[in-house]
Amino acid sequence: MLKDTKAIITKKQSWPHYVLLSISSPQMAPQTQPGQFIMVRTSQDFHPLLRRPLSVFHAGETHIEIFFQMVGIGTRLLGKMEPGNELDIIGPLGKGFTLDTADNRKTAALVGGGRGIAPLFFLAHRLCDRGIEAHMYYGAKSLADLPLKKKIEENRFALSCATEDGSFGFKGLITEKLESDLDDLQPGIIYACGPEAMLKTIAQTASKRDTPAELSLESMMGCGFGACWGCVKKIKKQGEINWTKICEEGPVVAADKIVWE
Amino acid sequence: MTDLSVDLDFCTLKNPVIAASGTFGYGLEFTPFIDLNRLGGLVVKGLYFSPRPGNPPPRLVETASGLINAIGLQGIGVHKFAEDVLPQLRAYDTAIIINVCGNHNEEYAAVVEFLDTQEGITAYELNISCPNVEKGGQCPALNPDLTYAIVKLVKDTSVRPVITKLSPNVSDIVEIALSAQEAGSDALSMVNTFLALAVDMETKRPKLSNILGGLSGPAIKPLALRMVYQTACRVRIPVIGLGGIMSSTDALEYLICGAKAIEVGTANFIDPQATVNIIDGLRQHCEKNNIARIESLIGTLDIQQEF
């Protein structure tokens, strides 16, 4: 866990509502695992006051990449940043996906809803390194909300898309597409990140099929490192159910440990 | 070499900067970022006697230059604290202050009675002012008689100094401060968060599950500073000021308004190094202005009407 006040933006790719930033942080980058996140200060003033938690899209030896949707004041300010600008970041934070859960399994299904695709690209790379086939599922409202489609294809990961309006791929929810593929795909594990309703459906599907699943949860965070106790979800641990800080025990949590509201 | 130490009568802090309860976890969460030995002190997250589940989420809302929280004092209870946390905290050379909570007066006394048996605690901060535990923001610090009763009980029980943390959600905070002093409080820390509400117009629902929460951050600084100023000149006991302190300039403002020390709260979330940056800033200010002892600044607000 480090604070880097001089992380320099080196590359930027933007779409109408989405941005991908590459940030040079030579100390933080090599420590970062798929599913972990960083807290980014989006303004040196007090509005917005809090840092923004952003999951890591990819991390190499010297650089961390973050992919985000511009939805509020913080992400819009961050989206205006340009190569050469310095960022103040804290990370890597939280528990990411457990890669060894996938060992001895041939195929993993990686399901991203909207901007939830962000941490799965990094995960697909790491699974690939371990000889596991990562089949990516990428769903959104419309084709315009699948900005990373090309990048995933370029990296030759198997990809299935779904759009709610049918503008690309399967017409409907990505969970419906996944469900229809599962008998053929027979994934040894399902990893997912996206809206809570999507995650809940995947947890139910995984439980029915007795397939392990790991889900990346989202919550309003005050600090990201366990001090504020704001980001809690109901999690089962050692037989007890408690409001649990997902910045520490998550954001990635085994599906069978999550108690859905 | 500037002397940053401040004398609170019941103890001397190496500098006036204390990490505020509820924003600093149990202290150890900050060790990846700062050396706790550098702090004047730290106040751990509020402790009830037993573990406490806290409120359902959403627990936080960001507002203009502020943060509303309704965590609901989730915590590990005194036994786990004494077993797992205190032995580690004791190793640091800083004032360890325990924020003491209770559902009723007897629980406050029970927490203190238990902690009195544990070594390595400098003082207790009596949390009678958390606005997001009881529905509607009720707490003892809203009433001078309830404040007196609870401070008196804890003082009669405790072998250690007691700091009473006051609520700003009152019409006359000086009256409550005088009650706490009368009951034997060794110091005051002021202020806790301001009772607040944020709504979502899309759903027409409150943004927090608890409906109401406590506002903190830069948004409250002028309000809290006013209360510290009004109180510090009326009480004999030391006042520890807090509310929206983000920088050493903010801290200095509190000192000249009469605070003998300050607590840094919400700033810890945004910058886990905020406390040590403020200490560095205080030292630089003193060196630049040839101030040998920071205590000489306390209560020096110039209020001659010469505008």
Image: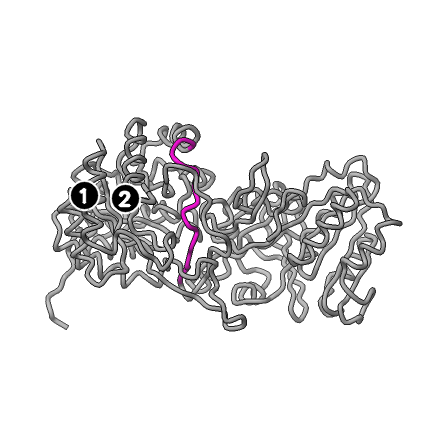
**Left or right relative to B184: residue B277:** right
The residue that disc 1 covers is: B185
Residue stretch rendered in magenta on the structure: B66-80
**Left or right relative to B228: residue A46:** right
**Left or right relative to B20: residue A20:** right
- Marked residue nearer the N-terminal end (1 or 2): 2
The residue that disc 2 covers is: B126
Residue B68 included in the magenta stretch of the image: yes
In the foreground, B200 or B119? B200
- Same chain under badges 1 and 2? The reply is yes
Residue at figure coordinates x 24%, y 57% from the top left: B253
The chain under label 1 reads B
Amino acid found under the numbered disc labelled 1: Ser
The chosen color scheme is: one colour
Place of residue A35 in the rendered image (x, y in percent of width and height, measured from the top left): 65, 47
In the foreground, B304 or B123? B123
Place of residue B269 in the rendered image (x, y in percent of width and height, measured from the top left): 44, 51
The chain under label 2 reads B
Place of residue A87 in the rendered image (x, y in percent of width and height, measured from the top left): 52, 56
Marks 1,2: beta carbons within 8 A: yes
Q: Is residue A87 visible?
A: no
Residue B199 numbered tag: none
Residue at figure coordinates x 42%, y 43% from the top left: B25
Amino acid found under the numbered disc labelled 2: Leu
Instruction: Give the structural element (helix, strand or loop) at label 2.
Output: strand
